[in-house]
């Protein structure tokens, strides 16, 4: 039990240290800019404790968590899927178009939209995996190029082709512009009916996205597959040492493609909370969640529980920092500084904790060995002769 608590404490220490260090450095920055860090952080925390803000934080954390899991699947295989941004946006516009053309019962309609999003995301990421195993093209390069092709080319073209009404230009607000609206049967209901009996009525039209439950299911599936299945073991083994895994009968090329496809399938779900809220894909569709997910995965150390922590921290900073513009206690951009410092500090803290853990394990192994054999034999076997009997 003590060893378990020790492991949990060591795992939690790095992100906590990183967070505390980020707060300390950010406080210095705030003081240097003439702001009061106590007032700034106090305003953010007070605002975050409101029920409506908590809903906003959970809504923001949901896609960040999905994006973090998508990136983490690649990281577990030593792959850097930097294309989550393009994958989820491409999946969103295709699933929005398909969903708008269908008239199905509620559950089936929603399932089709989610499956289409996962298939599109998985196929897009799978292209990068196939290029890596067949042509040796690094997945970082290929996913960056695919991002550019999708966002600046394919999605822009499809947005005009599938535009249902209005006009898209620099002077308009683009309100009401986008694909045909998805029928009500294709939208996941919000979760207010489940939580309001506990929290009371949620005011100001705040709604907890139904994709929150999908994100929970994805996290549970990620943990089970990665840590409780043969496939997960093969994936982790291939990421750690592909040569040893190949010697054990695991095809590294197959695992690379499979990992990229799975990463893309989860990436396809990242845009679904916004799609379900808007009911269509529009030119102002949410962006930068893919890059945010990479940071969340790094902070969470690719662990499903750690990614929850990272997603909530980043969501808290994104949402609660808005109050700073209203209160005037600090600039809202302080949240960007905090996020950057957290990542930098986390890298250092994780390395320090890793080295400390290795020293502790070596010490415990030595103590266990000494306890198991308190009187080891001398070199050459037998006991050493006594001086008196010599």
Image (spheres, rainbow, N blue to C red):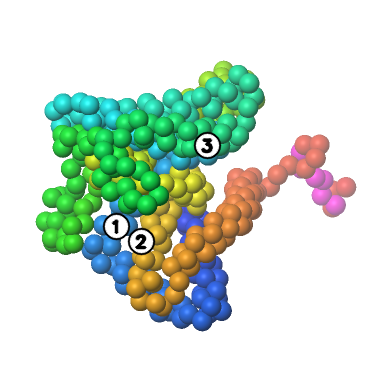
Closer to viewer: mark 3 or mark 1: 3
Q: Is residue 117 visible?
A: no
Q: Secondary structure at mark 2?
A: helix
Residue 148 is tagged as 3
- Please indicate whether residue 252 sits to the left or right of residue 377 in the image: left
Q: With respect to residue 3, does 230 lie above or below?
A: above
| Residue 252, position as x, y percentages in the image | 58, 23
**Rendering coords of residue 326 (x, y %):** 34, 73
**In front of the other: label 3 or label 2?**
3
Label 1 close to label 2 by CB (< 8 Å): yes
Residue lying at 58% horizontally and 58% vertically, measured from the top left: 344
Earlier-in-chain disc, 3 versus 1: 1
Verify CB contact (< 8 Å) between mark 3 and mark 1: no
The vertical placement of 81 against 353, above or below, is above
Label number found at residue 152: none
Q: Nearer the viewer, residue 82 or 250?
A: 82
Q: Which residues are magenta?
A: 382-387
**Residue 11 visible in image:** yes
* Mark 2 surroundings within 10 Å by alpha-carbon count, few (fewer than 14), some (14 through 19), many (20 or more): many
| Sequence-earlier tag: 1 or 2 | 1
Q: Main secondary structure of the magenta part?
A: loop
Q: Inspect the magenta stretch and tell me whether residue 385 lies in it.
A: yes
Q: Position of residue 79 (x, y in %)?
A: 56, 35
Q: Is residue 27 left or right of residue 229?
A: right
Residue 306 location (% of width, % of height): 44, 50
Can you tell which mark lies on residue 319? 2
* Residue 338 to residue 144: above or below: below
Q: What's the CA distance linking mark 3 and mark 1?
A: 30 Å
């Amino acid at each position: 039990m003590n060893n378990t608590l020790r492991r949990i404490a060591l795992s939690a220490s790095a992100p906590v240290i990183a967070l505390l260090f980020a707060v300390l450095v950010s406080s210095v920055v705030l003081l240097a800019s003439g702001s009061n860090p106590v007032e700034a952080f106090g305003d953010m925390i007070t605002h975050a404790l409101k029920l409506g803000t908590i809903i906003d934080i959970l809504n923001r954390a949901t896609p960040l968590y999905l994006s973090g899991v998508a990136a983490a699947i690649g990281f577990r295989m030593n792959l850097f899927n930097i294309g989550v941004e393009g994958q989820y946006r491409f999946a969103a516009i295709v699933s929005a178009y398909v969903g708008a053309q269908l008239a199905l019962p509620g559950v089936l309609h929603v399932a089709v939209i989610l499956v289409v999003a996962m298939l599109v995301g998985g196929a897009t990421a799978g292209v990068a995996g196939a290029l890596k195993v067949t042509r040796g093209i690094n997945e970082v390069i290929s996913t960056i190029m695919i991002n550019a092709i999708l966002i600046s080319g394919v999605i822009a073209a499809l947005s005009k082709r599938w535009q249902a009404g209005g006009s898209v230009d620099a002077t308009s607000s683009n309100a009401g512009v986008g694909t045909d609206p998805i029928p009500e049967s294709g939208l996941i209901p919000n979760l207010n009916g489940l939580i309001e009996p506990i929290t009371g009525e949620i005011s100001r039209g705040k709604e907890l996205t139904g994709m929150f439950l999908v994100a929970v299911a994805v996290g549970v599936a990620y943990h089970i597959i990665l840590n409780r299945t043969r496939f997960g073991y093969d994936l982790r083994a291939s990421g750690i040492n592909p040569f040893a895994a190949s010697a054990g009968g695991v095809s590294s090329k197959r695992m690379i493609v499979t990992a990229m496809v799975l990463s893309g399938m989860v990436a396809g779900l990242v845009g679904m909370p916004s799609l379900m809220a808007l009911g269509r894909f529009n030119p102002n569709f949410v962006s930068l969640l893919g890059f945010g997910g990479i940071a969340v995965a790094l902070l969470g150390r690719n662990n499903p529980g750690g990614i929850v922590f990272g997603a909530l921290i980043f969501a808290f900073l994104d949402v609660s920092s808005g109050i700073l513009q209203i209160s005037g206690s600090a600039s809202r951009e302080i949240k960007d500084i905090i996020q950057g410092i957290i990542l930098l500090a986390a890298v250092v803290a994780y390395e320090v904790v890793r080295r400390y853990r290795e020293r502790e394990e070596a010490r415990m192994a030595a103590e266990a060995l000494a306890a198991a054999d308190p009187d080891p034999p001398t070199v050459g076997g037998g006991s050493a002769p006594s001086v008196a009997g010599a």
